Image: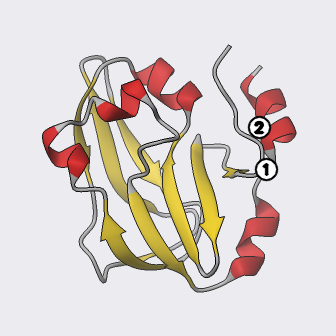
Amino acid sequence: MAKVIEGLYYSESHEYVRVEGDFGFVGITDYAQHALGNVVYVDMPEVDDEVSAGEEFGAVESVKAASDLISPVSGTVVEVNEALEDEPELLNKDAFGNWIIKVQLSDKSELDDLMDAAAYEACCK
């Protein structure tokens, strides 16, 4: 069974958000990295790009498939995880420890549309 962490917000497209103050750290879930297999490339936006909830912001490519990344929240990208440019396989080692983008949240009420850990676990079954 894939790992699910309490206290995060989850989307049906298998992204998570960890909220710290006005910022959200967005990544893919453990379930998603298992489904993808060995990750070989992460396509990320640029700092200062705007992302919108429900819209594509990049992609993760594995030896099996490529999968669009769908932002669970709206806001401005303030940081990208540059470690993933050289080591995309970090997502396989620890999906929750290796976020993809850090976003300044523009509308925290969007978090109400996402799932908690229990709902996400049920979604993955």
Three-letter amino acid code at disc 1?
Answer: Met
Residues marked 2 and 1 touching at CB (< 8 Å): yes
Q: Neighbour class for label 2 at 10 Å: few (<14), some, many (≥20)? A: some
Q: Secondary structure at mark 2?
A: helix
The answer to whether residue 118 is left or right of residue 12 is right
Please identify the quarter of the rendering in which residue 78 is found. bottom left
Please identify the quarter of the rendering in which residue 102 is found. bottom left
Q: Which residue is mark 2?
A: 120
- Residue 1 vs 93, above or below: the answer is above
Please identify the quarter of the rendering in which residue 45 is found. bottom left
The residue sitting at 79% across, 50% down in the picture is 115
The residue sitting at 38% across, 53% down in the picture is 100
Q: Give how far across and how far down residue 44 sits, in percent.
A: 27, 57
Q: Give how far across and how far down residue 107 sits, in percent.
A: 66, 84
Q: Which residue is mark 1?
A: 115
Circle nearer the N terminus (2, 1): 1
The residue sitting at 43% across, 51% down in the picture is 99
Q: Give how far across and how far down residue 19 sits, in percent.
A: 64, 66
Q: Looking at the image, which residue sits at the far top?
A: 1
Of the 4 image quadrants, the one containing the C terminus is top right
> How far is disc 2 from disc 1 in space, using C-alphas?
6 Å
